[in-house]
Amino acid sequence: MTAKAYLGQAYRLDQRIQSKKSQITSLENMAMNCTSVITGMPHNAKISVSPMADAVCRIVDIKNSLGDELTQLLNLKISILEIIHSVKNLEYQLILEKRYLCYQQWETIACDLNYSVSWVLKLHRKALRAVDTLMAGKEKKK
């Protein structure tokens, strides 16, 4: 796995978590708006009797998987932070942290560091090469 792919995993996982949070909010809103219709007529066993109960069950399932993904994201971010801090150049560390842990745009990073975007991208490429070297060294030790 390349350094860029490894470091980018946290962003994708964070996107999945945000998506699940949106699903939970949507389902909670739906559950609050559900009402039961009580009639004396027999009903089809395959049709849900309580849409609210179905929504609550789905919410619980999503919240359980969300907790697992939050733990996974935390562990991944710690691992990424350890790799980034293994890079000797402090400027490279800062760029990598801002991009892969804070998910900042290139323009924001450049503005924060008082650099041009092209210079930040050049430093980023060098930082990724440094991480690739570190990761290759760790692979050889295994």
Image (spheres, rainbow, N blue to C red):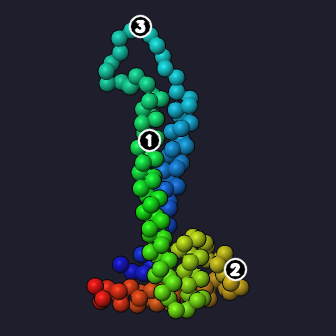
Residues packed near mark 1 inside 10 Å, few (<14), some (14 to 19) or many (20 plus): few
Residues packed near mark 2 inside 10 Å, few (<14), some (14 to 19) or many (20 plus): few
Q: What residue do we see at 64% from left, 83% from top? A: 117
Q: Residue furthest left?
A: 142
- Residue 9 is labelled as none
Of residue 7 and residue 71, the one placed in the foreground of this image is 71
Residue type at numbered disc 2: Asp
Q: Is residue 102 left or right of residue 17?
A: right
Q: Is residue 116 left or right of residue 103?
A: right
Of residue 8 and residue 60, the one placed in the foreground of this image is 60
Quarter of the image for the N terminus: give it: bottom left
Residue 55 seen in this snapshot: yes
Residue on which the image places disc 3? 40
Q: Position of residue 72 (x, y in %)?
A: 42, 63
Q: What residue do we see at 55% from left, 92% from top? A: 89
Residue 12 seen in this snapshot: no
Tag 2's secondary structure?
A: helix
- Residue 60 is labelled as 1
Quarter of the image for the C terminus: give it: bottom left
Q: Position of residue 102 (x, y in %)?
A: 58, 71
Q: Position of residue 94 (x, y in %)?
A: 59, 83
Residues packed near mark 3 inside 10 Å, few (<14), some (14 to 19) or many (20 plus): few
As measured in the structure, the alpha-carbon distance from the residue carrying label 1 to the one carrying label 3 is 31 Å
Q: Earlier in the sequence, mark 2 or mark 3?
A: 3
Of residue 14 and residue 105, the one placed in the foreground of this image is 14
Residue type at numbered disc 3: Gly
- Residue 112 is labelled as 2
Q: Earlier in the sequence, mark 1 or mark 3?
A: 3
